[in-house]
Amino acid sequence: MRKGIVVVVGSNTDMRSSASYTLLLFLFVWFRLAECSSFSDMDALLKMKDSMKGHKAKEDALSDWKFSTSLSAHCSFSGVQCDQDLRVVAINVSSLPLFGHLPPEIGQFDKLQNLTISQDNLTGELPKELAALASLKLLNISHNSFSGGFPGQIVLPMTQLEVLDAYDNNFTGPLPEEFVKLEKLRYLKLDGNYFSGSIPERYSEFGCLEFLSLSTNSLSGKIPKSLSRLKTLKFLKLGYNNAYEGGIPPEFGAMKSLKYLDLSSCNLSGEIPPSLSSLKNLDTLFLQMNNLTGTIPSELSAMESLMSMDLSFNGLTGEIPESFSQLRNLTLMNFFHNKLRGSVPLFVGELPNLETLQLWENNLSFVLPQNLGQNGKFKFFDVTSNHFTGLIPPGLCKSGRLQTFVITDNFFHGPIPDDIGNCKSLVKIRASNNYLSGAIPSGIFKLPSVKIIELANNRFDGELPPEISGDSLGILTLSNNLLTGRIQPALKNLRALQTLSLDANEFVGEIPAEVFVLPILTSVNISGNNLTGEIPTTLIHCVSLNFVDLSRNMLVGEIPKGIKNLTSLSVLNVSQNLITGPIPDEIRFMSSLTTLDLSYNNFNGKLPTGGQFLAFSDRSFAGNPNLCSSRSCTSSSMYPDDAFQKRRGPWSSKSTRVIISVIALATAALLVAVTVYMMRRRKLLRAMTWKLTAFQRLNLKAEDVVECLKEENIIGKGGAGIVYRGSMPNGSDVAIKRLVGAGSGRNDYGFRAEIETLGKIRHRNIMRLLGYVSNKETNLLLYEYMPNGSLGEWLHGAKGGHLRWEMRFKIAVEAARGLCYLHHDCSPLIIHRDVKSNNILLDADFEAHVADFGLAKFLHDPGASQSMSSIAGSYGYIAPEYAYTLKVDEKSDVYSFGVVLLELIIGRKPVGEFGDGVDIVGWVNKTRMEISQPSDAALVLAVVDPRLSGYPLTSVIYMFNIAMMCVREMGPARPTMREVVHMLTNPPRSTTHSHSQPH
């Protein structure tokens, strides 16, 4: 019995020992596997870090990704999540400028469900090892610079994938069709790339797709009508820079689940299909910036959920449908830049939720509904450039939330309603070019949030109120009215004011000194009034000034001493006054001054020479009878002949005069010889002090460069210096830019900006900086020589007729590519800030090169703006927001480039040829309004350069429309330079037939 018991006990012990051993072995293997997997994930993460961190990445990027012997250490890495087995299931590394690439080791994370590597500046192609991520549910690689074709086969094993976001990369080639096989895919975002070809028909086979965005690519062909089979789709965005053929598929009316439809800016033609009225759940319809024609279908009133409707920038005709009174949920109605006619229906003022009404640039007429704004929700109101008459509706600001009040270029009459003067929410007031009259409501000058007040070219009378305040007002334009009285000293309270235009009124008295204590004032125009007294001495302390026009008044006294303190001043006009005294010699040091007009005053004495005076013509000083040049002053100071005869005394004999003449000639010859010797010796000594710094191999010496600084070698002059053509001993030519003034310190005249930008970048369409020669006093910049000069010289000179359309279009494309490189391929991106036709230079083959980076700035935060201390650039090219906020971003360059495109089309300078205060953009808009039957073709034919002949009209229209996109008033509405290049290099196929311009 005991034995038996013993046996049994022994047997249980063996069994327990065996079970324990098995458990220990299992635990040991499990821990080893877990350890192996953990260390495998950690190792892969560290290799990812090494690969993703390029040489430009900051040292502290992913600084906590460090090796550790701890099994769970990698689960604490920033952006990393693990499961209970310590396997990595999520990697979220976003908004880090890493500049590297994605390594093959990414395929080791076979448990990964979420891979988000967004805004990291990663480059290269996607590794094929991504195919190993079979558990992946979310893949977000947006906002990087991945390139090459998207390898569609890598997603086939990702059977769990629900979200794929590849927005804003550099992918090329056709859209991958493999995505269709992902049965759980709900969200597909491929916009912002360079995918080409047509949208695959197979994209209609997605089973549960809810979000599809393919905009901002290079897609073409027709939009597949089969996409209407996507019954679960709620969001569809196909536009922006794609260039489709044909129109909107009427079948889209069958997409019952659709809530958001964006087909904007993609070359659509034809009419808007009435069948879209079946989209009962649609809340957003964006069809702007296409070539849509016909009337607005009245059937669209059945879209009962519609909240936002944008049909702007098309060729729509007819009237606003009365049936739209049924769109009770409508908050946004953008119908601007079409050909709509008739009146604004009364129901528009009765829409209960309407917040935005923008109808500018149409042919609408009659009186506006006087109930507009009565719904108490109005925020944005813009009816610029129509034919409206009558009174301004009185209740536009009943909501107390109105931000923009814009009625420019109409025929409104009567006063501005009092509620506008009391509307504290207003940010923008623009009512120029109407027939408004009466006193300006005094409350307008005390609104706390208003940034722009433009009331020019009306019939306002009365005086400025004595109380003026406002922390935000940047532009105050009251030009060409009937305002009287004194200019109020209270203007000093407008601390944010940058532009003050009070010209062409009837102001009297003196210019208040307080005007020039404003800290960021950049432009003052008080010309054409009845002002008296002297120019305030406070002027010289307003160092932010860029433009000053005090002409056509009765000012007396002298130009204040210390005027050279205005180091940013570009234009100074005090012509047609009674100013006396000498012209200040210190103006020679004002290198930023490009326009000076002192004509028709009472200046006296000797006209200074040298320095910046070399940039001014005789017209700048005309009409000053007591002013003399260096030569005329010298000759007028000599004795007259009769007086000389009385003073010649005993030296009158003939022999004596001969001896004196011989001695004089010998002395003169000796002096000339000595002078030549000393000059050569001085030049040689000066050259020996010059230092050459080259950015590439140059077969020249500093003295070779200095020897070319001769008057006969000058090929250009500007505010920053003089440009010479230099012929080197080896037979090559270089362009030498001699900067005005000293070569170091705060006022280096663009030297440092040129070196820091051009010295580091290389692009075919960017001017090459070869090096520089410098000493303690002067800097000489050396560039590749451009034998065909600047685009501005060709367009605005006698040779403009030889610049045919094909060449102009080619120059536009090349210049756009140069700017695109600065904005999108440089890190940090570079803003040029002085894009103009004179800064686009042409080589021997007429290839365009963007030049002159003296004002360039680095922008370290793409998408943000940078504040400047003063305005810079050239008048006619400066973007509106830059002029009144001093904030600059890449869209400021886009505006300037748009002006260049208009120059290429019109052949005229951006300012100075269209009347006072009108630039090329304003003239084009004015011309549009004057055409009896406006159309793109009619407008282009009205403004196109008459020297052009045999040009393809549709090509000119195409570039004209791109130009007008670039010069939109609001920066965010302008395209990027990347989009501009895409549009210019992908014109519609119909831009080939020629138009013969009559002569």
Image: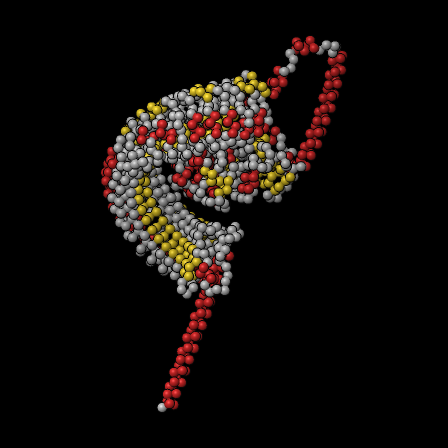
Residue 8, placed above or below residue 56: below
Residue 493 figure quarter = top left
User: Measuring 63% from the left and 18% from the top, which residue is drawn there?
Assistant: 634
Q: How many labels does the image show?
A: 0
Residue 19, placed above or below residue 76: below
- Residue 90 position in % (x across, y down): 41, 58
User: Measuring 61% from the left and 19% from the top, which residue is drawn there?
Assistant: 631
The answer to whether residue 617 is left or right of residue 407 is: right
Residue in the foreground of this view, choosing between 9 and 715: 9
Q: In which quarter of the image is the N terminus?
A: bottom left
User: Measuring 56% from the left and 22% from the top, which residue is drawn there?
Assistant: 583
- Residue 236 position in % (x across, y down): 33, 48
Residue 844 figure quarter = top right
As drawn, the residue found furthest toward the front would be 467
Residue 482, placed above or below residue 83: above
User: Measuring 36% from the left and 42% from the top, which residue is drawn there?
Assistant: 265
Inspect this view and state whether residue 875 appears.
Answer: no
Check the image and tell me how it is coloured.
Answer: secondary structure
- Residue 505 position in % (x across, y down): 41, 22
- Residue 847 position in % (x across, y down): 51, 39
